[in-house]
Amino acid sequence: MSTQIILPRVLQVGEGASGDIAGVLASLGCAKPLIITDKMMVELGYAAAIQTSLADASIRADVFDDTVPEPTISSIQAGVEAVKNGSYDSIIALGGGSPIDSAKAIGVLGKFGGDMRDYKFPRIVNEAGLPIIAVPTTAGTGSEVTRFTIITDDHSDEKMLCVGVGFMPVAALVDYNLTLSLPARITADTGIDALTHAMEAYVSKKASLYSDSQAIAAMRLIGPNLRRAYHDGNDKPAREAMMLGSTLAGIAFSNASVALVHGMSRPIGAAFHVPHGLSNAMLLPAVTEFSIPEASARYADCARAMGVADEHESDAVANAKLVEELRALNAELQVPTPAQFGIERAAFFDLLEIMAEQALASGSPNNNPRVPTHAQIIDIYKQLW
């Protein structure tokens, strides 16, 4: 059976890649971009640097910086209005996963109108919104190379998964220099997010030879370098490896889908406002341990790619080391439990039934090598305490 691979038209990777936006815009026939970002990117001077670079090429770019972490229907509305009223022909999405996800949604809604609820899965959005040039500043979400965006419904707190070619950026400029200012906490959370993407893509029931090659390469880059980047943010080789690993993991899961970790992670984020990468990190050890019996060889491959097991060791030994490594990684990177994050036990347990329903409804658990029942999802949630 053949596999359809969907990628950005332009993928530029390496130090200084973000400085080539003017040339990329020209190659796409675009001349009036809107920079969609957040206030931190403005404060750090990244947005101004892009504006200056574009001004040197006689291109004027306005800035919309009102995106928020974990974007919602209401948080993107001002951006949609800006696009509708500004006659822009393209969007430069600058930042982590949230600004890029916001830009994807704004690009489609700004062009076609409607409500974000109209675009959520199972609808497949193939209509092309405004062309997006993604410039990621975190090594984690892989959103610059995925055909997904996640927007929260303010009324129901549902994290709506939106899928389709219409959300794929036409270009991605992957410049690890933009990650050097990341604090340790964001480095950890986004890094484990990228690791989760690679692992889930590799064990997914929708995996292919192509996605496997990207996922394994991503794990080989992330495994030895996540701790290094966390402990020393100025470690350029580690930052470069993490940035490329994140992009490769994004390519892998965009073409193979994610699985149980993400299905269970979204309800935690929606209900308790836990950052996406952090809720993934909370779940990854327990979900991996649950899933190994149905994909022992695949998880052992993950352990070997990450460098925590040797080629001569059995799958059983490799998998034991993998679970041990994931727990040790969370401990070293100070990933909190839900209780340590500040979630009240009673509030968490009161929502277990609803969160399990939402996890199953997302469809992601069906990609898992071991598909859980409603009761098994609740049991895994309970293990987080």
Image (cartoon, helix red, strand yellow):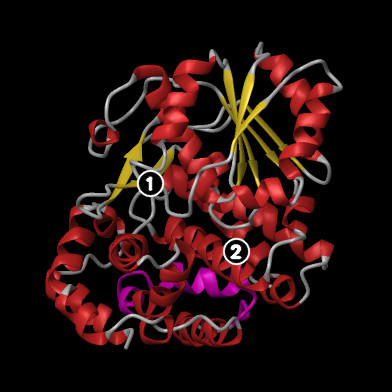
The answer to which of marks 2 and 1 sits earlier in the sequence is 1
- When asked about the image quadrant of residue 288, the answer is bottom left
Q: Which residue is mark 2?
A: 219
Which of the labelled discs sits on residue 262, or is there none?
A: none
Q: Is residue 361 left or right of residue 303?
A: left
Q: Residue furthest right?
A: 56
Q: Position of residue 289 (x, y in %)?
A: 36, 80
Q: Where does the magenta region start and end?
A: 290-312
Q: CA distance from mark 2 to mark 1?
A: 24 Å
321 relative to 358, above or below = below
Q: Main secondary structure of the magenta part?
A: helix
Does the residue at mark 2 contact the one at mark 1 (Cβ under 8 Å)?
Answer: no
Q: Report the residue at 51% width, 52% height from top.
A: 212
- Residue sitting nearer the eye, 42 or 18: 42
Q: What amino acid type is highlighted by mark number 2?
A: Met
- Residue sitting nearer the eye, 123 or 39: 39
Dot 2 falls on a residue whose secondary structure is helix
Q: What amino acid type is highlighted by mark number 1?
A: Ile
Query: Mark 2, residues whose alpha carbon is within 10 Å: few (<14), some, or many (≥20)?
Result: many
Which of the labelled discs sits on residue 150, or is there none?
A: 1
Q: Report the residue at 69% width, 63% height from top.
A: 182
